[in-house]
Amino acid sequence: MRRLGLLEQGQFSTAYYKSFLEEMRSRENDSFEIEHIPCDFESLNVHLPDQFHELKPRLRKILSGIDFQRFSAVIIPNMTLHLTLDRLQLAEWEESKLIHPFKVALRRLKKEGVEEITLAGTRHTSNHPEIKSYFEKGGINVCFASEESIRVFDDLRQEVYRSGANDTLKKELEDELRNYPNPLLLCTELSVIAPKNVYDLSKMQMEECLLS
């Protein structure tokens, strides 16, 4: 039986990933195990998104403790941590098991003929130049949300991180996303409360891992 490794992050983000994977397993009548990989996320979180001199050795240590041969795929839920991954010298066998959400999203959007997206994330990700370049190099035009919307996204993210999802938060996010063409969610906490009709890095990442 296939085994998926899920690196533990925030409480509600980890629960969201597990729930979504279990739902897909049931819906697709698939057969795989989900194994949580322990991680002191706070030791990373305080240095996100781009204190790479601190993040690189910490993430390298975490990866060194993973027995990649046991897994068909390994999922790191936090989107911005993949910018740190890009700065590590990964072995080919590590890189083949780690599902990189930005690379997955670019392939998916191009396959669907999407020519323009709006980055929808926190103040750290909504106008991040490296994230923008991932898609523009692939021929997709990138738009930014307004400063007001970014504040809304950031407040929603923090509320989900502290307390989890509720209908009020879901409605607020859905209303805000209506203002933009092809919003692409960049934050796992926003994925927890996201409507179904948006492009979502987290969901794309999980759907891709089931193909591995």
Image (spheres, grey):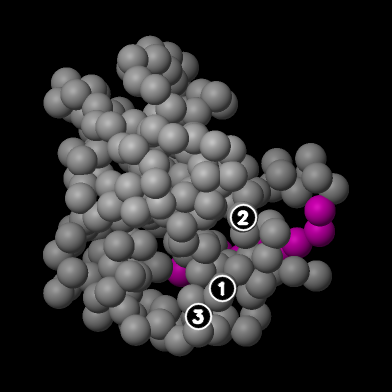
- Write down the quadrant of residue 91 in the picture: bottom left
- What's under tag 1, amino acid-wise? Lys
Query: Are there few (<14), some (14-19), or many (20+) residues within 10 Å of tag 2?
Result: some
- Write down the quadrant of residue 154 in the picture: top left
- Residue at 75 percent across and 61 percent down: it is 32
Q: Earlier in the sequence, mark 1 or mark 2?
A: 1
The residue segment tinted magenta is: 30-38
Tell me, yes or no, whether the highlighted magenta stretch contains residue 194.
no
> Are the residues tagged 3 and 1 within 8 Å (C-beta)?
yes
Q: In the image shown, does 78 or 201 lie closer to the viewer? A: 201
- What's under tag 2, amino acid-wise? Glu
> Are the residues tagged 3 and 2 within 8 Å (C-beta)?
no
Q: Secondary structure at mark 1?
A: helix
Residue pointed to by mark 3? 94
- Residue at 56 percent across and 73 percent down: it is 97
Instruction: From the top left corner, tell me how far across and down residue 160 is, in percent.
Output: 36, 34
